[in-house]
Amino acid sequence: QVHLVESGGGSVQAGGSLTLSCEASGYTYSMAWFRQAPGKEREGVAYHYSVGNIDYTYYTDSVKGRFSISRDKGKNTVYLQMNVLKPEDTAMYYCAANNKLLFGGRWQNVLEYNDWGQGTQVTVSS
């Protein structure tokens, strides 16, 4: 069973940056970052998988150009670099893992993931 641990959350002012980390203890094929603000549904933020040495990434529209997901297979760790943060980015951020490729945009479906981290809070002030 995969165990995921997130870190790197904190409080920043609008326009600032944060880098989140998620270390996996077991095998993962694809990994994603989700976020959930109070009173809202959990939202897919970014998704990553690789074929050989080629990396593929996907993002929700609201973070394109600002966030970047990457993975270090040697450390079995996925990162989320967040730049130009906005107050609307404030949420609990969760790392998720899957053992297969999710086709046709299914990466945004919470139910497709079997393993989740405990979450790390990101707060962006105006």
Image (cartoon, rainbow, N blue to C red):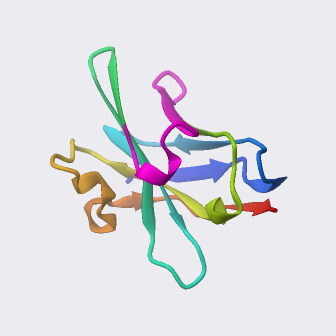
Is 67 included in the stretch rendered in magenta? yes
Could you say which quadrant of the image residue 52 lies in? top left
Compared with 50, 1 (above or below) is: below
What is the quadrant of the C terminus in the image?
bottom right
Q: Is residue 76 magenta?
A: yes
Q: In what quadrant of the picture does the N terminus appear?
A: bottom left
Residue 88 x %, y %:
64, 64
Give residue 49's position: percent from left, percent from top. Answer: 32, 33
Picture quarter containing residue 26? top left
View extreme (bottom): residue: 39
Percent x, y of residue 40: 50, 79
Residue stretch in magenta: 58-78
Query: Which residue corresponds to the image point at 53% horizontal and 59% vertical from the top-left?
Result: 94
Q: Is residue 99 above or below residue 34?
A: above
Question: Residue 33: x, y in percent?
Answer: 48, 51
Q: Which residue is more in the foreground, 71 or 73? A: 71
Q: Residue at x 53, y 35 (%)?
A: 68
Between 82 and 32, the one nearer to me in the picture: 82
Visible residue check, residue 23 = yes
What count of labels does the image hold? 0
Q: Residue furthest top?
A: 53
